[in-house]
Image (tube, helix red, strand yellow):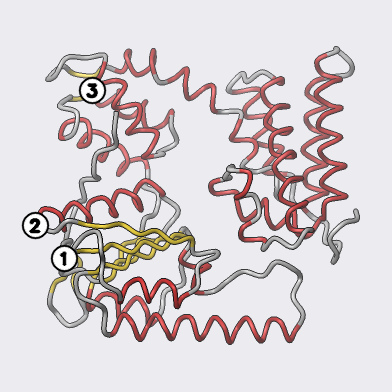
Amino acid sequence: MGKRPLRSESKETPSPGGGEVVFGPGCRVAIFHGPEVYLRSGYTEQLKSAIEKAGHEVQVIRFDGVTAAPADVLDECRSLSLLAPYKMVIVDDADQFITPKTSGEGEDDESEDESKDSGKRRAMLERYVQSPSEQVTLVLRSEDWWKGKLDKLALKVGVVKECAPLDKKRAANWAATRARQTYGRSMEVSAVELLVSSLNGDLARIDGELAKLSGTTREGETISAALVERLVAPVAQERKPWELSDVLLNADPSSAMNKLHELLDRCGIDPVALRWACLDTATKLHAVSQEIARGVPAAAAGKSFKFFFGAKADGCRRVGKNAGPGACAALLRECVEADWRGKTGQGDAVHGLEGLVLSFARTASLNTGRPGGR
């Protein structure tokens, strides 16, 4: 089932000048920033839909902020569209588009050059935002963002929305509203609470499960907690092992050790699944470290393999860069050996996992200062 546009609590953002810029063709610049990917993409779709409802055919042009040059993006904004009368120019990873991340440790002169380049990029964007093109909406999307002059300028001609994860109460309200307005289903209070807690408030996953739940009920029928427990809880249980991978790359092993025993003791997760989560994380970490050692910018490492790490992307790239491929290869080898020992009944499964958690922490605390060695 295709994803429907996000229903916003408010379509208006007050501007410092006292006027209002609404979602539509009058919105020349939009900044959507924060870790909640579903909100960033949802607001983008909502903005595009509003422009189309105003009678404009929209051509969408996308740029990768890690590799795109400011001149290319701004030239696209200033040029006429040949395919449609209105253009939406989207830049993802916009924080790196403005302030590129380094690929190495960084010498002083390199840092100074990068700072100057970042200043030039921001100045170019600020000049454009002060006089944006008509029939064009520039959309800057990013997980990380540093507020400043650009935001204030953007509010005069567009919108700035923070896309932060919702707490459980707000996520529950959102899920209940989404079920009613989009899928035509009401939900028991206990069903909403179970759905949100099972999926840790992840809006994209909640929406996907709502679509599945609505497909098994008739329009107007109430979704019960029993149905959520039967259809959603098993899916959430399957994904729980990956919660360990979210904390494996901390130099302090305490959070990972606590998570390990929570998953083993309270959630009853099989050690086999947890060893696989360790092996998968080590595999990606090793691949990223190899790319960085070959000169790929740290911010772009891993993209060529078509895997993304969500909230732990920066941690994976940081450890891969600092520890180097030698240390990451040794960690991967240890994970493979631990998995083999577990499958052949050698040693205690829990002790083996605890040893892997400590090895991940040791690797995360390394800083070789050079690509390669341990």
Mark toward the start of the polypeptide (1 vs 3): 1
Pointer 1 and pointer 2: residues touching (CB < 8 Å)? no
Tag on residue 120? none
Position in image of residue 12 (x %, y %): 16, 63
Work out how far the residue at label 1 is from the one at label 3, CA to CA, in angstroms: 39 Å
Look at 67% across and 61% down and name the residue there.
298
Residue 229 against residue 254 in the figure, above or below: above
Look at 34% across and 75% down and name the residue there.
151
Q: Which residue is mark 3?
A: 188
Work out how far the residue at label 1 is from the one at label 2, CA to CA, in angstroms: 9 Å
Position in image of residue 174 (x %, y %): 26, 40
Mark toward the start of the polypeptide (2 vs 3): 2
Nearer the observer: mark 1 or 3; the answer is 1
Tag on residue 55? 2
**Label 2 crowding class (10 Å Cα cut-off): few <14, some 14-19, many 20+?**
few
Q: Nearer the viewer, residue 251 or 91?
A: 91
